[in-house]
Structure formats: C-alpha cells, structure tokens
Image (cartoon, helix red, strand yellow):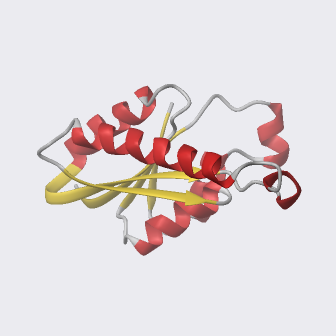
Amino acid sequence: MYDTILIAAALFDDGRTTRGLVAQARAMLNPGGRVVLVHVLDEIPKYAAAHIPQDQRSAHEHKVRDTLEKIASEVPDMKTEVVVRSGMASSGILGTAKERKADLIMIASHKPGLSDYFIGSTAARVVRHAETSVLVIR
C-alpha cells in the first residue's frame, strides 16, 4: 500500500488509460493517501514557438488541466492533485515524483517497437532513472 501514487497521465485516448490507472491506484492507496496526476507537455522548439500564438499554448494547457481535473473529480472520495508541466516527458514525471515524494509511479506503456531500442520510450526512461518503485501497465 502507498501514501502517494504518481500517475503519468496520457490523454491521447480521451483519458481512458489514465482512468484505468486511477482505478488501479485507488485499490493500492493507503487510507488518507493521495494520487498525483501529471501530464508533461512537449517543449516547443524556439524556432517553432515564435509562430504559435501564446494564447493557443495557454488554451491547450488549460484544456489538459481541465481534463485531468475532470478525471480526478470522478473519484470524489480520493485525494488528488493535478500537475501540468512542460519539457521532456520522462524528466517531468521523475521531477514531479521527487517533488511530491511519490511512493509509486504508475505509467502506461505501448508495445515496444524498433525505435524504442534506439531512443527508448518514456516508460523505459522512467523505469531506468526512478528513485522509487514503478508500475508499468500495458
């Protein structure tokens, strides 16, 4: 059982994967424990950022935050926190886990492909560099 579970929230599938992770986390949470939902927005290269209106970037961040807060509110009797960061996904996940003193990191992973053997997936980088336990769900 865990006091703080960090869930790396993926929203590419309208949050279905994240909702599944939240349900699993709830079963592993100590009474009074909390779940931290974190989503890391990719950093936009400076040459491209100059062509993207700032309000569009802010609107996207607000949409992500609203989606995560909606997912969190679907489980009203569980303490939740929502974190939205920018940068490299694995670094953002690991940094948030350290800041929030997570006992467990939960992350979904796809079936590895050839490109993962050369550059590695986010889940693989999190597993390699985490200072706490990591549960990878497929």
User: Residue 25 appears at what percent x and percent y?
Assistant: 29, 44
Total residue callouts: 0
Residue lying at 46% horizontally and 72% vertically, measured from the top left: 98
Residue lying at 66% horizontally and 60% vertically, measured from the top left: 87
User: Residue 55 appears at what percent x and percent y?
Assistant: 61, 51
Q: Is residue 19 left or right of residue 8?
A: left
Foreground residue among 81 and 1: 81
Asked which quadrant contains residue 73, the reply is: top left
Asked which quadrant contains residue 97, the reply is: bottom left
Residue lying at 23% horizontally and 47% vertically, measured from the top left: 28
Foreground residue among 109 and 69: 69
Residue 34 lies, with reference to residue 101, above or below; the image says above
Residue 62 lies, with reference to residue 87, above or below; the image says above
User: Residue 14 appears at what percent x and percent y?
Assistant: 47, 26
Q: Is residue 70 left or right of residue 117?
A: left
Residue lying at 22% horizontally and 43% vertically, measured from the top left: 26
Q: In the orientation shown, which residue stands out farthest toward the right?
A: 47
Quarter of the image with the N terminus in it: bottom left
Foreground residue among 71 and 58: 58
Residue 137 lies, with reference to residue 84, above or below; the image says above
User: Residue 117 appears at what percent x and percent y?
Assistant: 80, 41
Foreground residue among 42 and 104: 42
